[in-house]
Image: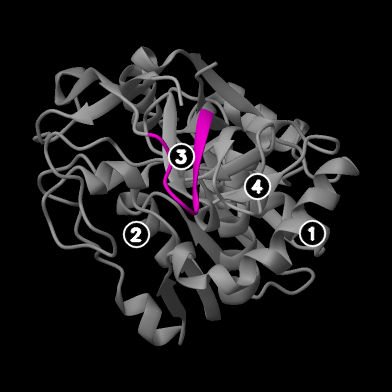
Amino acid sequence: MEQIKNKQIVLASRPIGWVEESNFRLVETILDAPDEGEVLVRNSYLSLDPYMRMRMDAVKSYAPYVELGQVMVGGTVGEVLESNYAGLKPGDLVTGSLSWQLYGVTKGKNLRKVETTKVPLSAYLGIVGMPGVTAWYGLNEIGQPKASETVVVSAASGAVGSVVGQLAKLKGCRVVGIAGGKAKCDYVTETLGFDACIDYKSPDFRQAFKAAIPDGVDVYFDNVGGEILDLVLASLNPFSRIALCGVISQYNQSEPHGIRNVRSLLVNRARLQGFIISDHLEKWAEILPQLEKLVAEGQLKYRESVAEGLENAPAAFIGMLKGENFGKQVVKLT
């Protein structure tokens, strides 16, 4: 194999509070040729997701944290350039976790072949990828919504929340979203078809939220945690269900928000369950074709924010953590 110069973004330092661009460093390396059973991939798009913030801290979590000097973790889609794996050949399009870099070498069994006749390549990092599967699993397996129930979704215009709300509408639920800013709320109601969307940045947010849920909350899909979770807890119905997917409002806080309305879980006999979609890999093969079909038929809509170039990944990541993205945040690499 001809030597290939690779570019990578590595973790240069651990953030204290909010992430800064100085926490990352762009480096150049030379790629090794793929060994037996391995594949060389040129990455086309990189996924940026909130969970990456947790992996920057040297604390025990559900997955190992990124070591200083190590390439930042992340999902990718790209093209196979060289293969020593029977299941893949040059030219195949694949998705995997090849991190913040232009090229990657990995075992072929760690990659999933995709095709772009039904959905664009970048969508395999979003609505027909990890965020879409996360939405489907959390809503259906934990939320278990029934027709006419009220489903509330935080970060409703985001990669996960937007899918949750649309799936709930397909089940005949009343769906109320929470998002930041009028433009995002308008998109959630006018394009995605939610029944209502409340702007958490508005000074009358709490009053507007109460007005939007006259019959209380049966299912809450939480992506943000903090004060909004606390607010929803106060409006739960008996035997309600909460799928705790993320707590993005807390990732950059040195002193996380303390939940006060825990009593509501008891008196309403509610169920709150945190989940990590990588614990349920056996479900992906069942869920992905359903999502792909709904997207191809136009029943599921999505939006992307696209940053250009690997060097701009840190700024795009910080912007996503601050809610500056609109929909799924990806970085176009090639």
The residue beneath circle 3 is 205
Q: Amino acid at mark 2?
A: Asp
Q: In front: mark 3 or mark 2?
A: 2
Q: Quadrant of residue 201?
A: top left
Could you say where residue 165 lies in the image, as x and y percent from the top left?
A: 67, 51
Q: Looking at the image, which residue sits at the far right?
A: 297
Which residue shows up at 82% across the image and 58% down it? 170
Could you say where residue 42 lies in the image, as x and y percent from the top left?
A: 52, 27
Apparent side of residue 119 relative to residue 216 in the rendered image (left or right): right
Binning the other alpha carbons within 10 Å of mark 4 as few (below 14), some (14 to 19) or many (20 upward) gives: many
Report, in whole angstroms, how far the alpha carbon at label 1 lies from the one at label 3.
35 Å
Mark 4 or mark 2: which comes first in sequence? 4
Question: Which disc is residue 290 wearing?
Answer: 1
Mark 3 or mark 2: which comes first in sequence? 3
Badge 3 vs badge 2, beta-carbon distance below 8 Å: no
Q: Amino acid at mark 3?
A: Phe
The reply to whether residue 156 is visible in this rendering is: no
Q: In front: mark 1 or mark 3?
A: 1
Binning the other alpha carbons within 10 Å of mark 3 as few (below 14), some (14 to 19) or many (20 upward) gives: some
- Secondary structure at numbered mark 3: helix
Could you say where residue 74 lies in the image, as x and y percent from the top left?
A: 40, 40
| Magenta residues (range) | 33-42
Binning the other alpha carbons within 10 Å of mark 2 as few (below 14), some (14 to 19) or many (20 upward) gives: some
Q: Is residue 305 above or below residue 328?
A: above
Mark 1 or mark 2: which comes first in sequence? 2
Q: Amino acid at mark 1?
A: Gln
The reply to whether residue 75 is visible in this rendering is: yes
- Secondary structure at numbered mark 1: helix
